[in-house]
Amino acid sequence: MKRIILLLLCLLILMSVLVACPNPNDKEFLVEDKDYIDLSSKYDGESFDCSESLWYMNQLKDVPLPDPFVFVENDTYYVVGTSDRSINTVDCYVTTDFVTYDVHYDIYDPSFYNGWEGDNPEIFAPEIYCFGGTYYMYYSANDKEAVRRCSVVVADNPLGPYEPLVNDEVDGLNNPLFACDDYPNRMLDTTVFTDDDGKMYMYFVTSTDSQHIVGLELISPYMADWSTYKELVIPGTVDSESEELLLEWELYRDNEIKIAEAPFMIKSGGKYYLTYSVNGCWNKYYNVCYAVSDSPMGNFVKPYEEGKIWTNLLMGFPGTNDEEADIYKQWSGFASGTGHHCFFYAGDELMIGYHAHKNRDWNSKYYTERYFAFDRVFFDDSGVPFCNGPTYSVVNLPQSISGYKNIVGGATVTGNNVQNLEKISDNYIVDCYNLDSKNNEVILPAGESYIEIEFDTLYEIAGIIVYNSAYYDEYIVEIEYIDFGNGNIVYYPQFCEDFYVDDETEFINPCSCFNIEFLNTFKARSVKIGFNLPNGGSINEIVILGK
């Protein structure tokens, strides 16, 4: 009997010790809304409630500027464009965080100078550059004969006021500085590119019965060498030396003329990428395409593969001329008119700024409101640029603004029951432009699986993004856990299907994602993300915000 009592006593003591000292492998729940926010739970039917110091969303409500250009100086972003408020002057929206903006109206007003512009100049697509301490604003406007010309005005600071340039070489008050009697066509959408050797080039659009993109060398910021004038991009052709219209997606059926406009140059891997928009700014299929060359003056060639479509699309809403087989019609309601772009740097991160129709389901030949949006740009192993966008999702702000960067790149990534694991940090988020891009997703077969990311140092963690599949039949609705290996663990983050998924058209928004924001940051050296999927599924990138 005593032995039994002693045994029971020992058992009670052992049980009390186990209760007092839990298994070190057990994890405690982080408490939602106390320790972290699952942003899916913060969707109110229109937007997400989240920290504006960590996230942004292209809601198209802050900057009503079509044809945007972003000039960056001292971590300040100056956004100019075609002013919907006053088409005859230039406005500028200034921000340091892309959350709050200071608006400066009429930084250039040609009526004040009574120069070459007519009474209704209709200023389009201004761009600001700084050369030698002087700020130059390039723009197009109507002259007194209502012919569109290009010129440049100057100021001693980004906000002006800008004024005509008059010196011993030019008279920018009485004459547009980029007009030539030998090239009498309408001109618009001027952009400037300075190469590594210091040579300057200007690209713009000529317009008669069709719009073409041309280029020339600049002698100075305000003088062109017209002997170098060259046609570079013709809508629909593979290059400017071809006449066959093989790229039918650049020639949307509702357009009265063939359109190629809004040029911008970017250099990568020794190649020159001349980017531009097609299909008309009023059209939902207005987007950004590209052609590539070994020289800033061409010959520029558009990537083309017979039997495929959108082979040269950089960003935008894809479309087709086949009304019966319009496989992209489900994009209506997600994006519309995402074009006329620029590239700019936020710290070390390359961004694309563009405008989009405020009405995301726009389907008319008439004008609609257009607002500024921006997304990230990356380069693949061959140096070809690609965009994560257009996005209509909660996205992390650039590191230069939030203080947090994506720390997955360079980490050690392992997994179990996972395919294409190397795609988890390639920066490429599948965009549905071409139908064979499922190979770029991370495949999660049926059953339990996990992805573990280990860092070489401790990081302060502020948030995490898991980008879902871009395919309706592959997306997942729940993550089983996110374990930071230090006692911090989040169970069952949810995907906001109400916002990102349209069951009627069987469409999921590209770049849709899970978002976790930590209200109290913590240190971690690893992250393990677990899944338990009866039917399997896919995801794209994982972004962990740390510093």
Image: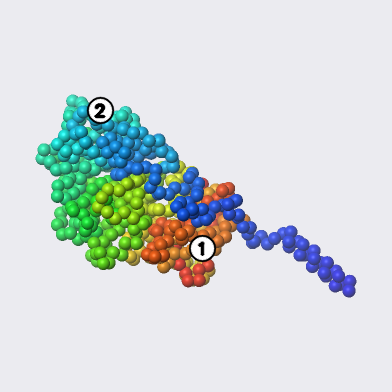
Real-space Cα distance between discs 2 and 1? Answer: 60 Å
Label 1 sits on a secondary structure element that is: loop
Residues 546 and 195: in front is 546
Q: In this view, does 125 lie above or below 167?
A: below
**Lateral position of residue 4 relative to residue 329, left or right:** right
Where residue 395 sits: x, y (%)?
44, 51
Q: Is residue 358 above or below residue 502?
A: above
Q: Can you see residue 315?
A: no
Q: Which residue is drawn at 89% across and 74% down?
A: 1
Residue farthest to the top? 168
Q: Name the residue under label 1.
A: 478
Q: Residue at x 60, y 55 (%)?
A: 30
**Lateral position of residue 179 relative to residue 85, left or right:** left
Where residue 408 sits: x, y (%)?
47, 54
Mark nearer the N terminus (2 vs 1): 2
**Lateral position of residue 198 relative to residue 478, left or right:** left
Q: What residue type is labelled 2?
A: Phe
Q: Which residue is drawn at 34% across and 66% down?
A: 436
Q: Which of marks 2 and 1 is in front?
A: 2
Q: Quadrant of residue 17?
A: bottom right
Where residue 105 sits: x, y (%)?
34, 33
Report the disc number at residue 112: 2
